[in-house]
Amino acid sequence: MQLSINGTTHDIDVEPETPLLWVIREELGMTGTKYGCGLAQCGACTVLVDGEAVRSCVTPVDSMAGADIVTIEAAAADPVGSKVIDAWIAHQVPQCGYCQSGQVMAAVALLKANPSPSEEDILGSMANLCRCATYNGIVAAVQQAAKA
Ligand code: FES
Ligand code: FES
């Protein structure tokens, strides 16, 4: 099948039910998207699919035909993604960093759907887990990105 990721079409040959995350990491070698729980619980594997945040660890690749997939590797090329990354740096959000590519992609999806989110909106819609508890920094950075 063909898969459109970060504006490039890839021919891939895997079992239809293969999780999108494995294709991104193992077949295409893009390792910015992380494997955390594999159970749609943590959000480390979040990518954008047609602008919405999707947990790629539980997304069968055959459901992605015709979809526009964006990973952390292309986040900076997106106008909203660029603002989010700048705000993440300004607020020094990451600690260990493992969850952060998923956090950034979730923030981009949130701001595309809601350009001026309240703190409640941010906490309510960004359900990605962070074992380093960077939640305060995430809220501050999303609010800065929304104003940028
Ligand atoms: S690895 Fe996908 S939600 Fe945790
Ligand atoms: S920064 Fe360490 S898990 Fe989030």
Image (cartoon, rainbow, N blue to C red):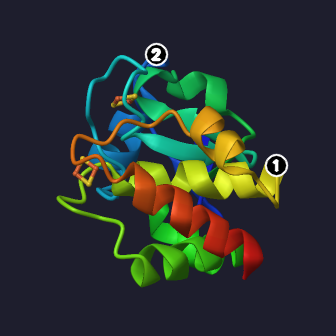
Disc 1 is placed on an element classified as: helix
The residue under the point 37% across, 30% down is 42
Picture quadrant of residue 52: top right
Q: Quadrant of the C terminus?
A: bottom right
> Of 104 and 59, which appears nearest the observer?
104
> Of 125 and 35, which appears nearest the observer?
125
Residue beneath disc 2:
17
Asked whether residue 56 is in view, the answer is yes
Expressed as whole percent of the image width and height from the top left, the position of residue 40 reads 43, 21
Q: Can you say whether 74 is above or below 47 in the image?
A: below
Numbered label attached to residue 113: 1
Expressed as whole percent of the image width and height from the top left, the position of residue 81 reads 62, 70
> Of 44 and 69, which appears nearest the observer?
44
Q: Can you say whether 147 is above or below 134 in the image?
A: below
Does the beta carbon of the residue at mark 1 sit less than 8 Å from ligand 1? no
Locate residue 63 relative to residue 15 in the image: left or right. Answer: right
